[in-house]
Amino acid sequence: MEDRRAIIRELEDKNKADTQAVNKLYEDLGEALFQRIGEGEPFADGEGDSPGGILAEFRKLHSEIAESRDIIKSLEGDIQRLKELEAEISEKETEQTRLENEFDEVNVQLGKFLMETADSSDSLKLQEEVVLAKIDEQEKKLAELESKEGGIFAWIGKNAQMAVSKGLLLKNRFALQRLYRSAGEKYVSGSDEYHLEGEANDTAEKAKELKEQLSQLAVNLAMLKGERRNMGDLFSSEGSPARRIQSQEKHIAHTQSQFPEVHRRFGTAAAASKTESEGSFGSILISSDDELIEKSNTLNLEIAERKLKISVINASISIDYEKSEIEKSRKSIQNQRQKITAAEEAIENLEEEIGQAEKRIEELDIFIQKNGSDR
């Protein structure tokens, strides 16, 4: 029996290899036929496992892949656009900082020019005089402290006072700068009317130009940041672009893995149509397909023959098995009959013992009656 099972395994292994070869032939045929069909419509039917149905399934898979690739392309475009936005925003913010610093410097220069031509009763002019007086006071005080001499304790006190004076001097100079800048900004905003000429007028025009640049830059930055915010909101609601791309790539891989089976089914249907007077594939099959179809038919016949051999061997194994079971049953019957014979002999012995016991009881009853005693 083991020899026959070994033969079956060998036949099954051969059939497995040939089945794979046949499937590959059908797969290659189906793939070639799909390429020949292109955008054509050679079949009237279009459902189920009919040629038209398989063609529709094939096109649907391609459509899904194309759709996923379009989504990936769009997502990659979004990612690239987001990178571009970040770069543009960073660049414009750097430019904004540079322009703001330059605008402050020009406004300070403009403010100085304005203070030179301002009326003595002007509030800013009065503030300038106050601050300049404080600066002058602190500078004189520092000069006095620097010229002051003395011992170690005097030197310590001198340094402490100088530190305070320098701090106040720096504070007042900053205040003066703010005052000039405020005057310049006020002029540029159009709230003051001064007649400026020469360098002062050029400085004023430069300040206005910078203000316009900053205004336009702020608009552009707002638009870019708005676009970035909208894209961020979209990514938050629909998920990370990278993960969505990964999901689409997995879908493409899964869809592509279905093509070999669709190709095989289509090739199988085409090969079968050769036995039906060309069938519905007559317009797309060519002479070079005959060799492939004949080879697949030969392999199918060999597979069928081996399957028949396997069935015959399995039948012979089954016969041997049934015979073995019959023999086991016959032995069991024989054993049971022997048991029955032994049981019948035991029954006869028991019945004989019963008869002998009943006979003794009868003899004892007669004895008692004759002797007149109650039992």
Image: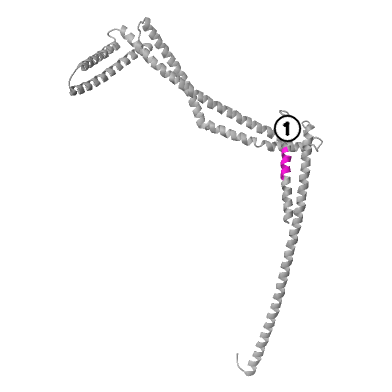
In the foreground, 53 or 338? 338
Q: Is residue 79 above or below residue 205?
A: below
Residue 46 percent location from the top left of the image: 72, 34
Left or right of 75? Residue 57 is right
**Magenta extent:** 16-24
| Point 44% across, 18% down: residue | 95
Q: Which residue is mark 1?
A: 32
In the foreground, 207 or 315? 315
Residue 302 percent location from the top left of the image: 78, 44
> Which residue is at the far bottom?
371
Is residue 49 visible to the viewer in this orientation of the structure? Answer: no
| Point 73% across, 67% down: residue | 331
Which secondary structure type mostly characterizes the magenta part of the structure?
Answer: helix
Check if residue 189 falls in the magenta segment.
Answer: no
Residue 233 percent location from the top left of the image: 49, 29
Instruction: Pick the quarter of the image with the C terminus.
Output: bottom right
